[in-house]
Amino acid sequence: MTNLDKQITQTLKKVAGELEQPNFVMPYQVAADKRKRSRLLGVGAVVLPVSISCALLLTISVSPTFAAYVKSLFDSSDQELQHAVQEGFSQKVNASVTDQGYTLEIEEILADPMRIVAVYSIKDQQNNFIHPDKLSISNVEVTDSKGNIIKETRIYGVQNRENYGYLTLKKPGETEDQKLVLQFEGNQIDSVEGNWALKIPFDLEKTTKASQVLPIDKTYTTPQGLQIKLNSIMHSPTAASVDYETKWTEEAKKRLVEESKQVKGKVDSADPYVRYDDFKLNFHVENEKGEKVKDLTRALDTPSKALGEFGHLNRQYGFAPLSPDHQYTLVLDSLVKTEPYELGISFEPKQLADKPVRVDMDGKTIEIKSVSFDEPLNEASPKTEKHVTILLEAYVKDITYINIADTILMDDDTDKIINRFGWTIKDEAGKVYDVTGGDFKMIGKDEQGRNHIRMKLQSYDMKELPQKLSLTSELAEKSYDLNWKVPLPKEDK
């Protein structure tokens, strides 16, 4: 973008405050990370104030960079997408289908080897916008030119913003075909059933040519025995992504097997569930000044691919595009691993009338704050039944998450429970109540440096309060700090 283009952009931003333009948020962005966004220019004609000079207007008519900025439905606050738009990688579509008086339109697609983002809208017979969350999406997939479905692209997310919906699909890594087709179908708008199906051709050739894959070839083994190999980095118009592999050492595998035997509920007829893949790595990217670069892991993270033996996986870590004018470093911050971790407390609900019940043991503390019958916390619970809700707090070191819901692993041959992954609620007679929902919140740190966690455990199995309750949990996510730094290869200018 030239200096004149920048000046034009800044000027028009000031005068476009009253024009509606949808804001874009990546579909996997957590709610707590919402950002304030400025309104941008609308899709239709733009009326400029008289005070803007004729020279400025003439520049607007011939500037392709500015034209892309004005016409695009991608918000400039998402710099990685807007950068791609400014470079001319966005594809206008304007394909529509009408049924039952409603029109579904795909207006714009931005696709590169990292992801596919499509913008759509819904209008009624009077051409009024219908909020995109009124659409029930029945099918989304991408096919190659021969009609073969690319399985990876069935994984998608939707973010609804004002009058527009933003559909983000995973990268089409299963094909080398550059000419693809987005198939987008809806079967209901609000309470009206119908058939809204669109097939939208789009092309990856331009963005693929603008992408580079550069080798890294660096390895590291964590103190916990996880081997990490950084293979390469891809620079694309909308993002950068590091491709890497993970694999446990033989000694670490043996420890994982032993850990699995510690988990409750194992029966002799079944092998223990070994958590080879139950871990995650936390990275960040920093520039030459040690400043963190915007992290897009939630938006660009792809499912791991097994490479044969247990625990040998291929993964990607994605983030914002990197400027070729700077040197960047990938930093591995921590390994978070699910492993045995016992928490337990027994109490009589009537004790809570005086004060919370608290237990301190082995450097960890658990405290029951209250037990009550409440309305359901989640939509999966029956609407007509109240739930018992147990509010508890825990003070634990290095623990980042404790599973709430009671996920049960069954033995297919015997129909016996092998493992319960989550909390177990039991009364004085030994009856187990399934945990059907709840809530987890990290409060902060206490004076001892332990993580202060607040949890709600909810169960609609319990119709009345027993005389005595016991709560136990035997698994948790534990975080191990790391500090491995690898310089990233620079993209060719």
Image (cartoon, grey):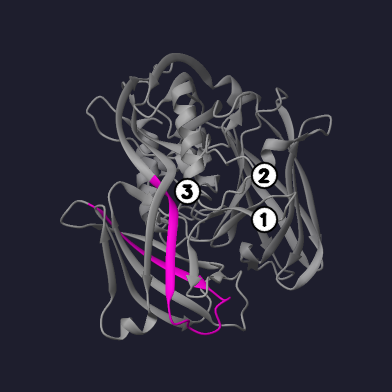
- Earlier in the chain: of badge 3 and badge 1, it is 3
Task: Give the image quarter of residue 162.
Answer: bottom right
Q: Is residue 129 visible?
A: yes
- Residue 171 percent location from the top left of the image: 61, 34
- Earlier in the chain: of badge 2 and badge 3, it is 3
Residue underneath mark 2: 269
For badge 2, the amino acid type reads: Ser
Q: Which mark is residue 416?
A: 1
Residues tagged 3 and 1 counted as in contact (Cβ below 8 A): no
Q: CA distance from mark 2 to mark 3?
A: 56 Å
Q: Secondary structure at mark 3?
A: loop
Give the left or right position of residue 61, taking residue 348 as reference. right
Chain part drawn in magenta: 450-477
Q: Secondary structure at mark 2?
A: loop
Q: Nearer the viewer, residue 210 or 258?
A: 258
For badge 3, the amino acid type reads: Asp
In the image, is residue 371 part of the stretch drawn in magenta?
A: no
Tell me if residue 375 comes above or below residue 452 in the rendering: below
Q: CA distance from mark 2 to mark 1?
A: 10 Å
Residue at (60%, 73%) from the top-left corner? 381
Q: Is residue 37 visible?
A: no
Mark 2 or mark 3, whichever is nearer to me: 2
